[in-house]
Each structure stands twice: as structure tokens, then as C-alpha cells.
Amino acid sequence: MSSDERTVVEDVMSTPLETVSADATVMEATQRMRETEINALVVRTSPRAIISSTDVLDAVAEGQDVTELVVSDVMTTDVETAAPDLYMEEVAAMMTTYGIKHLPVVDDDYVGMISSTDVTAHLS
């Protein structure tokens, strides 16, 4: 397969990008995830961050009262990102290497999100 035929992140990523404020409640974030049928939201902070269903599940498993938490209490910071022109095989390798399921797609600013579900659907 030539590089001209290979699929890149931009061809598969989810857009528009769903975001949430760091001071939003975890309940608001999870409701947004449910409404949009996704498992992670970008949190527009520096360093880059996301809140995922796994972050919420971890908080519950640790006995935290998620009704009293805000996104910044549970979000994952310093997240890995992907460029829009990255090949899908490279994204799959990154997700495997880092043990992650979501990568914000960044081209100067956030432009989308790629998930392990997107990668699996494309590569299978």
C-alpha cells in the first residue's frame, strides 16, 4: 500500500470536538458524554487534558463522591496528542504503547478526537 492510499487521523477523527470546562461538575461531563455517545471530552487547559469515562470510573472505584467533584478533580493531564496527518497504524501503536483509548487531535489547536473504537473500526 502506498503512502497516498494510507488513511490518516484526519480521515477518521471525530468532529466537532466536544469540550468541557475544568470547573464543570463531573455529573455535567458524564451527562454530556452520554448525550453525545462518546467516552471522553477535551478539557481546554494547559497542560492539555481530557476527562474520560475511565477517569470517572476510577473515582467511583476509589470511593469518591462524584456528585461533589469537578472535572479538574479527576481529569487526566499532560495527555498524548496526535497530528491530523498521522497514519492510523501509528495511532494504534501509540495507544498500545501508552495504554490509552483517546487521543485529542491537535494542529496548533484542537481539531478533533480519535478513539480506540475509531482505530479498531478502521483497521479491522
Image: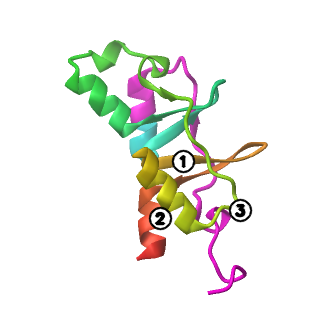
Query: Judging from the image, what secondary structure is the residue with disc 3 in?
Result: loop
Which x, y percent locates residue 93? 48, 59
* Vertical side of 103 occupied by 63: above or below: above
Q: CA distance from mark 2 to mark 1?
A: 11 Å
User: Magenta segment: does it hold 29?
Assistant: yes
Q: CA distance from mark 1 to mark 3?
A: 13 Å
Label 3: which residue? 85
Judge by depth and name the residue closer to the eye, 1 or 52.
Answer: 1
Q: Earlier in the sequence, mark 1 or mark 3?
A: 3
Q: Earlier in the sequence, mark 2 or mark 1?
A: 1
Image quarter where the C terminus lies is bottom left
Label 2: which residue? 119
Q: Amino acid at mark 1?
A: Leu
* Vertical side of 33 occupied by 27: above or below: above
* Vertical side of 102 occupied by 78: above or below: above
User: Magenta segment: does it hold 74?
Assistant: no
Q: Is residue 99 visible?
A: yes
Colouring scheme applied when the structure was drawn: rainbow
Q: Quadrant of residue 74?
A: top left
**Residue at the image position 63 percent from the left and 78 percent from the top:** 6
Q: Amino acid at mark 3?
A: Asp
Cβ atoms at labels 3 and 2 below 8 Å apart:
no
- Identify the magenta region: 1-30
Q: CA distance from mark 3 to mark 2?
A: 14 Å
Q: Which mark is residue 103?
A: 1
Q: Is residue 38 visible?
A: no
